[in-house]
Each structure stands twice: as structure tokens, then as C-alpha cells.
Image: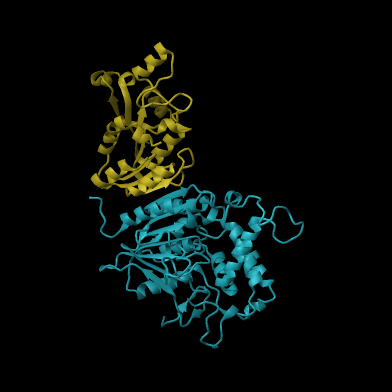
């Protein structure tokens, strides 16, 4: 299944934010690039020099059909072949929670990219909290449509958890752009409760 | 060719002849030419039929032709027989101009780079300074890589399929055994055989061995299982009992009808010697450092002759080099032969990749 298609209602928000930090001519790496449509947009509209990384064969075929260079790789494997700071921006959109070691991957992307843009699904969102609290059930939502036993999302975190990990890894959060659900004002005040997704721009 | 072709071994080939075929039409600015390089046993006849009565079309007919992934309504396709071959280009069967007799085993040992040097001359002869693409699988993929390294400005993109940056010890070992089988055939006679008494047994054995390496355990299991050939019980003898034995026998026989034993020596030797990093101390990154064209590298999951890891090494080096590169391992149970059989997925990728690399193409 194509993750990005599934998450489409939420897709544009974080990708729009990420697209806005791309300067013309930037080299952009998208890890877990799906069908490559986002990179195609960066290539066309931002004149970016792009590369996607994807594990799924059908997605790779579609990337090539979209004119987007892509290499097949497992993000849980070694990414050491990418030279240090070889991209202006490394993007990880709605992907971190699917990886086996998010900490190692974060270290890799801030090594490979001069900057990294990571969009994080917020497990601390009030709906998640209430589902656990009042229904006693694992949270499900439009971003997380799966059952606990079949979900590819194996490493959820809250925004606070994410910030803490970045601090531990000595990764600098340059910018934090929470994406509100229903309550934009409250999201500004309490992102960890009201943001559904948050885009972090990182540097090391 | 008028002038002699210099070879890596230090000798040169005089009066080189290159058999080639083309399909499609070269456009006005000569920017739609696609060179297809063939594998060990291939030839220049890549697509279509010479006459409507031909039983079989060219060796990659499903990939190349009108309306096919490499669409000859759009592209001008060139395919030539490698030097050292036995399907029209200069090889051991050719007459040595110095002696007036066939070269046989006095033919110089050639390399993949020599094959490519000859192809470059052909492409120039056709008036093409920049190819849209060079593509091929297996030994054809080696030629593709050699093209990208030796003539970085001569193509927009290149597509090495089911191949590697060098021959592995395992690959070399199989070739050795194959050649030993030919040598052991009394008809071989150090290469000085006649068409009436050629080393068919040896060449067929060599082919059977090689053919096994093109399949996978899975594909053999599916195709033959332990089925018996035209019998219901075992013979308790050494004629063929099993379907797989009969199949190999058939493949061996078919091969000797169209291939020359001495050519088998020269072409396998060229692949043994193939190592892109020979001049860079084993450093693949350095070896590809002058590559400029965009690459689409393809491997197949069940190919144990040229495992995916070999393709990944090439991809990693190209990425370090900052080249534009795409890579896919296609899931397939067919083994090495998948590059000829997985036309749907491979074809779609090649079609789209070529489309986006045509001269003047832009997303807007």
C-alpha cells in the first residue's frame, strides 16, 4: 500500500511546509519517497535536484514514471554510502515511525543533509490521549488507520519525546511547525496536545 | 573499418568488420539513438524478423520494436555483434589478413573495453556523436558500464541490467570449467577444427553448465520439478530420466547450431578480465568518477550469478560521485534470465526512463 496516498488528507500540510524551505537548485533527498510526486513537484516548481529512496518496487516504478530518480534501499539498513552533507535537505515525511531505529536514522539524515525536515505524527494529540484514557483502546485516526497488530507504525512518539531525543542526540531543532487539527490557536499554545503532525527542521 | 582497432592486449585488429542492425529512424538532430549491447550468446539481431518466415524474432523482441518499451517508432535502435563473436563481426573464425587463414586461437584476447571501442567506432560511423542511451543486460551490462566510463560524453543515459562492475571469482570459475569442457573434446584440437568435426560435445557441455547459472533453484523447481521425461519410472541407467536433463541436452544442442567454440573462449575470457576498477586499484568510486550520464541500474532478486549486491556497489559509487542514478531490484524467481523474461516491470521502467532523458525534455 502506498502510505502517502493513504494519508492524503494530511499530506499537503507537512509537505507544503517542507517545500517552502527548499531553495531553487537545492539538492533534496526524500527518504521513503513513495511515488515521487512530492519530489517531482520540487523538481518542477523549485528547480531542485532530487533523489528518492524507497523500498517498495511498485512505488519505484511509479517514481521513474514520474521522472524522479530513485534508489531502492531499506532505511533500516546502512546509509553510509551517502557522503556527509551531500544534500541541502534530507526529508523524512511520515516515515520515522515505521523505522526500526528512529534514533539511528535521525543521526544519518542530519549527517547526509545540511538540514533535515522531519514530519512527526503526534501520539500526544488529545484524541490519542482520550482514546487510551476513556476507551482503553490503542489510538486510531486518519493518520493511524491501522490496528495495533498490523500497523507498520512501530515507533510512535509525542512531540515532547521527539524534542527530547533530538536533545539527546545533540541535534538542533531549527524550526518547529506544528500542524493543527481543529484548534489552530490552541495548537500554537499546546502543540503536544493539539498538533496532529509537526514538521521539525533539524541541523547538526 | 579502415584503420586497425587497438586492443588492450597491445595488439591490434586489422580490417575489422562489425555486423550491426538498426531499427527505427534517426531523427534530424540525431538525438534519438539507443545502442543495445548483447550478452554472451547474443547477436546483432535484436528485434523483428528478417523474413516473415523466420521462426523466431530477434533476441529482445519483446523489449524493442514498434510500440514496445524501447519504441522504434520513437527511437533509432542500434545493436552490433561484439568483436570476438561468431555472428558476423570479426572473431576467431575470421580470416587473418596477415596469413590468409582463419585466426582460430591466434585471435588476440579481447576485453569488454575492446568490444566497446569497436562499438564507438560504429556509432561514429553512423554519424552519431551522442547516444540517447546505451542499455544491455549481463555481459551487455558490462559493456554499458564500460561505455559510461570510457565515453562519458557519448550518451544521455545508460541502463546496466543484471550485471556487475567486475567478474567475481565464482563467475570466473564457471567460465573456466566451461572452457575445460571444450578443451576436453578431442575435436577441439587447440581450436583448429573444421565445420565437419567441431567440438560440439564440449561446447554443448559448456552451454549446459552456463545455462544452469542463468536459472534459479526456484525456476527449475517450478519448470521441471523431479518430473521424468517421457517415461513413468526411472531407468536405472545413465540416459536422461529427468525433464531437467532433457531440457539441458536440448539447450546444448541448440547452442552448438549457432555458436562457435573458439568464440566461446574469447568472449568468456573478455568477461573474466572485466573489472572496471582495474586501473584504480580496486576503487570503484574512482573508476566511475568521470561518469556524467544518468543511470538506471536494475538487478533481479533471484539472480545469483550477478547478485543484487553487485549492482548496489555500482549505485553507491555513482551516488558518491553525485551522478543521477536510479536503482531497482525487481522481484523475480527467474534467476539471471529474468532480464530477458521480466519484460513488464523492466520494460515500464526503461520506457519511462528513456522518455525523461530525451534531449530537450522538460517537466514544464
Residue B191 in the image, given as x and y percentages of width and height: 62, 78
Observer-nearest of A133 and B250:
B250
Residue B97 in the image, given as x and y percentages of width and height: 51, 86
Above or below — where is B274 with respect to B306? below
In the rendered picture, chain A carries what hue? Answer: yellow
User: By what rule are the colours in the image chosen?
Assistant: by chain
Q: Pick the quarter of the image with the N terminus of chain B.
A: bottom left
Observer-nearest of B133 and B5:
B133
Q: Residue furthest right?
A: B236
Residue occupying image coordinates x 43% and y 41%: A56
Residue occupying image coordinates x 43% and y 44%: A57
The reply, left or right, for residue B166 in relation to residue A166 is right
Q: Quadrant of residue A118?
A: top left
The reply, left or right, for residue B46 in relation to residue A39 is right
Total marks in image: 0
Q: Quadrant of residue A146?
A: top left
Above or below — where is B6 with respect to A16? below
Residue A22 in the image, given as x and y percentages of width and height: 27, 41
In the rendered picture, chain B carries what hue? Answer: cyan
Amino acid at each position: 500500500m502506498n502510505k502517502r496516498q493513504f494519508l492524503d488528507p494530511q499530506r499537503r500540510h507537512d509537505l507544503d511546509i517542507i517545500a517552502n524551505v527548499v531553495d531553487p537548485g537545492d539538492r533534496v533527498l526524500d527518504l521513503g519517497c513513495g511515488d515521487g510526486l512530492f519530489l517531482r513537484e520540487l523538481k518542477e516548481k523549485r528547480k531542485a535536484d532530487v533523489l528518492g529512496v524507497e523500498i517498495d518496487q511498485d512505488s519505484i516504478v511509479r517514481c521513474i514514471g514520474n521522472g524522479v530518480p530513485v534508489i531502492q534501499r531499506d532505511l533500516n539498513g546502512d546509509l553510509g554510502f551517502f557522503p556527509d552533507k551531500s544534500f541541502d535537505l534530507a526529508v523524512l515525511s511520515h516515515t520515522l515511525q515505521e523505522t526500526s531505529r528512529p534514533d539511528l536514522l535521525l543521526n544519518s539524515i542530519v549527517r547526509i543533509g545540511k538540514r533535515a525536515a522531519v514530519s512527526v505524527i503526534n501520539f500526544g494529540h488529545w484524541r490519542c490521549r482520550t482514546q487510551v484514557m476513556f476507551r482503553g483502546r490503542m489510538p486510531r485516526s486518519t493518520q493511524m488507520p491501522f490496528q495495533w497488530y498490523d500497523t507498520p507504525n512501530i515507533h510512535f512518539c509525542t512531540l515532547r519525546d521527539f524534542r527530547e531525543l533530538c536533545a539527546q542526540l545533540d541535534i538542533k531543532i531549527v524550526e518547529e511547525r506544528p500542524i493543527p487539527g481543529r484548534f489552530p490557536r490552541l495548537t500554537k499554545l499546546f502543540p503536544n496536545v493539539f498538533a496532529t503532525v509537526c514538521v521539525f527542521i533539524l541541523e547538526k | 573499418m579502415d584503420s586497425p582497432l587497438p586492443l588492450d592486449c597491445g595488439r591490434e585488429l586489422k580490417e575489422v568488420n562489425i555486423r550491426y542492425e538498426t531499427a527505427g529512424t534517426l531523427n534530424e538532430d540525431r538525438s534519438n539513438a539507443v545502442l543495445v549491447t548483447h550478452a554472451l550468446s547474443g547477436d546483432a539481431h535484436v528485434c523483428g524478423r528478417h523474413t516473415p518466415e523466420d521462426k523466431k524474432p530477434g533476441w529482445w523482441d519483446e523489449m524493442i520494436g514498434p510500440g514496445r518499451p524501447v519504441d522504434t517508432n520513437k527511437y533509432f535502435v542500434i545493436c552490433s555483434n561484439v568483436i570476438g563473436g561468431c555472428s558476423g563481426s570479426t572473431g576467431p573464425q575470421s580470416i587473418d589478413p596477415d596469413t590468409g587463414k582463419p585466426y582460430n586461437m591466434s585471435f588476440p584476447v579481447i576485453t569488454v573495453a575492446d568490444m566497446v571501442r569497436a562499438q564507438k567506432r560504429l556509432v561514429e560511423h553512423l554519424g552519431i556523436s551522442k547516444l540517447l542511451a546505451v542499455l544491455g543486460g549481463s555481459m551487455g551490462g558490462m559493456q554499458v558500464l564500460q561505455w559510461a566510463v570510457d565515453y562519458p560524453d557519448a550518451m544521455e543515459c545508460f541502463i546496466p541490467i543484471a550485471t556487475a562492475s567486475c567478474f567475481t571469482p565464482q563467475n570466473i570459475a564457471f567460465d573456466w570449467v566451461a572452457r575445460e569442457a571444450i578443451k576436453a573434446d578431442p575435436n577441439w584440437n587447440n581450436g583448429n577444427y573444421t565445420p565437419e568435426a567441431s567440438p560440439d560435445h564440449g561446447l554443448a557441455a559448456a552451454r549446459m553448465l552456463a545455462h544452469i547459472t542463468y536459472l534459479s533453484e526456484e525456476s527449475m523447481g517450478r519448470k521441471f520439478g523431479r518430473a521424468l521425461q517421457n517415461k513413468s519410472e526411472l531407468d536405472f541407467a545413465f540416459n536422461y530420466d529427468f525433464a531437467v536433463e532433457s531440457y539441458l541436452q536440448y539447450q546444448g544442442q541448440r547452442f552448438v547450431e549457432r555458436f562457435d567454440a573458439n568464440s566461446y573462449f574469447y568472449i568468456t575470457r573478455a568477461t573474466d578480465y572485466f573489472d572496471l576498477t582495474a586501473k584504480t586499484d580496486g576503487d570503484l568510486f574512482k573508476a566511475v568518477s568521470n561518469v556524467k550520464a544518468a543511470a538506471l541500474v536494475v538487478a533481479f532478486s533471484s539472480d545469483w550469478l550477478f547478485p543484487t549486491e553487485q549492482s548496489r556497489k555500482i549505485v553507491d559509487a555513482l551516488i558518491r560521485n553525485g551522478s543521477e542514478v536510479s536503482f531497482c531490484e525487481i522481484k523475480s524467481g527467474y534467476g539471471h534470465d529474468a532480464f530477458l523474461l521480466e519484460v513488464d516491470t523492466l520494460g515500464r521502467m526503461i520506457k519511462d526512463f528513456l522518455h525523461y532523458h530525451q534531449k530537450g525534455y522538460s517537466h514544464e
